[in-house]
Image (cartoon, rainbow, N blue to C red):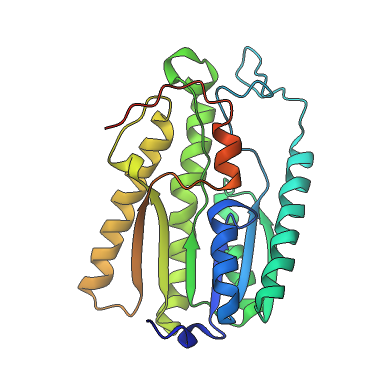
Amino acid sequence: CPDTTLLANKTVLICDASAGLGAELARQLAPHHVKLMLVTRTGRSESLTNKQNVYNKEGKNNSPQSQTQISAYTWSSLVRVRDEVVSLGSPQVELLSYDYSNLEDAHTIIEKTIEKLGGLDYLVLNQAEIARGYLVKTRHGQSPEFVERTFSVNVLSPIELALSALPHLEKSKGHIFVASSTLSVVPKAGLAVLSATKHALNGFFYSLQQELLARESPVSLTIGALGPIWTGDMELLMKDDVLPVKSV
């Protein structure tokens, strides 16, 4: 049995912690008395089959559900997660809301974590823009704006955060965890753009891992090729699934 007392008072930054895997990880870490920075997103995860999202001929989203409403929902979810993890034993929990597609300010997440928690030991890159639907049948799914935003959130944002965090993780001999996916290996109809981002994510971080090893950096890095995890978010995502699932 591992000695989890080593986690006591360590600082952990978890991206996309308002629900799903990020929220569950926060709950699992809290009894070990870690200090947490929990980040939720401002923005929208797009579904090409979601009837609530209505796109005009230019490919712009005219959904009646505003970004302000979505941001308020994710923030209230994050607050509930914070209350849970405090009750489970975490001595300090800080919250942050951020638009992961804003790459220029990605460093502020790291800076605020250092300012609030006094350091950084673990960086969990769990953010993902999940888009579902047959790409060839949807004008929006083929739009450069859609593809660019998905790559910004899923690939460029983790890269920027990791590079900003590296000097601090060098000091703490810390660790980076990257939430990748089996989609980086096994294709699935309706998830073309998401699959492409996971391939890119693996390419960058496996290469970075080799660089860290080559220069004997004290920073360790893990890429997790995760399959479907039946969280509440996944249940909602798959509830109206119109895509055929084929075992491979």
**Residue at horizontal 41%, vertical 58%?**
178
Q: Is residue 177 left or right of residue 152?
A: left
Q: Quadrant of the image for the N terminus?
A: bottom left
Residue 150, x across and y down, in percent: 50, 37
Quarter where residue 222 is shown: bottom left
Quarter where residue 35 is shown: bottom right
Q: Quadrant of the image for the C terminus?
A: top left
Residue 218 versus residue 53 in the image, above or below? below
Q: Is residue 43 left or right of residue 230?
A: right
Q: How many marks?
A: 0
Q: Is residue 168 left or right of residue 199?
A: right
Outermost residue on the front side: it is: 1
Q: Camera-side residue: 56 or 15?
A: 15
**Residue at horizontal 61%, vertical 24%?**
50
Residue 54, x across and y down, in percent: 67, 19
Residue 36 versus residue 38 in the image, above or below? below
Residue 237, x across and y down, in percent: 57, 35
Quarter where residue 162 is shown: bottom left
Q: Camera-side residue: 130 or 214?
A: 130
Residue 21 versus residue 73 in the image, above or below? below
**Residue at horizontal 63%, vertical 59%?**
39
**Residue at horizontal 57%, vertical 39%?**
235
Residue 26, x across and y down, in percent: 58, 66
